[in-house]
Amino acid sequence: MRYWITRSTTRFICFTIAFIFLSLVEILIPCSANEQKTLYPIIKNGKWGFIDRTGQVVIEPAFDDAWPFENDLAVIRKGDEKTGKYGLIDLNGKIIFQPLSEKSPYFSDDVAWIRINNKWGLIDKKGSIIIQPEFEFEGVSVFKEGLSPVLVKTDGGNKWGYLNKKGQFVVEPILEQAAYFTDGLAKVKFDGKYGYIDTSGKYAIEPQFALAGMFYENLANVALQPTGDQKYGFIDKSGKFVIEPRFSYADNFVNGIACVLIGEGKDWKAGYIDKTGKMIVPPKYEWWARFNGEYANAGYFRFENPFLEITYQVLFKDQLKKRYCKFLCYERKLKFTFIDKNGKELFPLMYGNTGSQG
């Protein structure tokens, strides 16, 4: 018998586990009297509501979908996933913004985009509309440092620009790609090359890179050559290389450490560098994650228990798909450990699942 788990069921299971965990934490660590009120989504008879830490229903199930509270606001939906509309409620269940938006509001920089009748506008955390839904954008990103990338249909195709919270273009829609701001700069692509602009819309670093990441901790990972021939290094906000390009890939810095890949194709190995470019964890891992505080996951993949070749011959006619499936149909296992910033493995490698890579 085959069982199907729906999106709502999956979310309910996750929220239930989180609620049980937090309840245990509350027993072990008593909450202070002035602790901020926290509510958790529940589903009952197909409708979503919210309970508190004691399991008491605080907001009766009345919504077709609901998300966890963030900064005292929760997104709710009336109607199904295709035609339903999204709104916002507070911790008392009061509607802060009526379910009118065709897209779920996500707050960043204290504002959130909404879309009504295919036109984009902006609301604040009080639910007040600060930009009327009047922009027929092809897409939007989040606001960071006062600006949001927006995708506009032009005579030359879809182009990105930057809008401020007054609804004014700081950068006209002429860009091929545009990222949100980090560390005061935003990655943009113009005429096939990547560069960086400041919040005034001026180039801080002229477009010159074939590949580029965003600025984190005042450094950005970039490559001068396109994919296939790329070697990544790191630049500062003047555009100067502070770590010369020599890596097959380089992740952004987190807590002063970045993962880098050495080697080509399937032969690459992951290690970690500091901001001087010094290799503090030798490149030997096949699986990696960023440092979260003092530790990071790292490990190796193992491929076991291949399916019989006759299975491929029955299901797939041509050799290309046959070979492709033969690779995918191996059972993939991850053998991992935690490492510290000196590369010391905290325990022997073990099989398991540490979450998503990168």
Image (tube, rainbow, N blue to C red):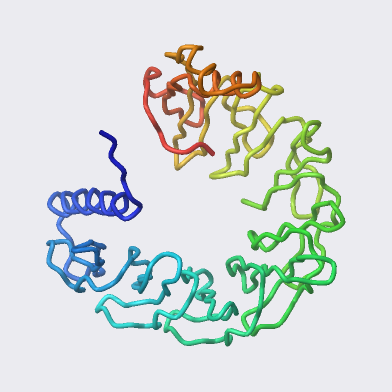
Residue 64, percent across and down? 31, 68
Which residue is painted at 40% across and 79% down in the image? 99
Residue 84, percent across and down? 41, 72
Task: Classify residue 48 as left or right of residue 338.
Answer: left
Quadrant where the image shows the N terminus: top left
Residue 282, percent across and down? 59, 22
Which residue is painted at 40% across and 18% down in the image? 349
Quadrant where the image shows the C terminus: top right
Note whether 36 is above or below 207 in the view shown: below
Q: Is residue 282 visible?
A: no
Note whether 330 is above or below 45 in the view shown: above
Q: Nearer the viewer, residue 344 or 302?
A: 302
Residue 322, picture quadrant = top right
Q: Is residue 334 visible?
A: yes
Note whether 230 is above or below 236 in the view shown: above
Residue 249, percent across and down? 68, 34
